[in-house]
Image (cartoon, helix red, strand yellow):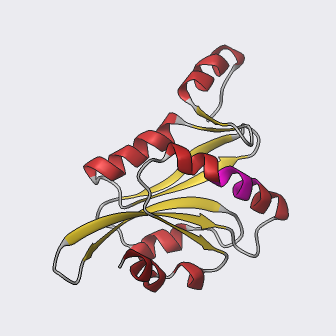
Amino acid sequence: MHFTDQTDSTAMAMAFKMATTGMWVTDECKNSFMEMKWKKVHRYIVFKIDEKSRLVTVDKVGGPGESYDDLAASLPTDDCRYAVFDFDFVTVDNCRKSKIFFIAWSPTASRIRAKMLYATSKDGLRRVLDGISYEVQATDPTEMGIDVIKDKAN
């Protein structure tokens, strides 16, 4: 995303400020999340912080046919991201349910600055994304495996 001076005020009006860090969450983030939550058009959304513009933006969306493995494979091994995943499951009494998971991805190989930025901005993004059931923090793929998700959902 690139803004000129003329559109800065428009961009600010269209973004949600994350008060604690001066980060801004774009409308695209909130709109994509609402589409996932209510219309089920996305299985997951990956968000990233653009350090120069100080905007949280949508990095990738996964279609309704994509799996948790697709989400895990889309996360970089050397940079932080946030992700939300719409987990569908059947309860022990045979009820279909859906829970939205928030994943804070901070791999060991990522820069210290990125880890700090993502850690301090997380709560602000979570406040904008209303309807998250569970949170998972992971520094490697085993900490966010599908078994972890299933255990938390049940």
Q: Residue at x 71, y 17 (%)?
A: 5
Magenta run includes residue 121: yes
Q: Is residue 40 left or right of residue 15?
A: left
Prevailing secondary structure class for the magenta stretch in the rendered image: helix
Quarter of the view holding residue 142 = bottom right
Q: Give x and y (percent) for residue 112.
A: 83, 64
Q: Is residue 127 left or right of residue 21?
A: left
Residue 56, relative to residue 98: is it above or below? above
Q: Give x and y (percent) for residue 73.
A: 51, 73
Magenta run includes residue 114: no
Quarter of the view holding residue 61 = bottom left
Is 133 or 39 nearer to us in this picture? 133
Report the span colored magenta. Answer: 117-122
Image quarter (top left, top right, bottom left or bottom right) of the C terminus: bottom left
Q: Residue at x 70, y 56 (%)?
A: 118
Q: Residue at x 30, y 61 (%)?
A: 64
Residue at the extreme top? 6
Image quarter (top left, top right, bottom left or bottom right) of the N terminus: top right
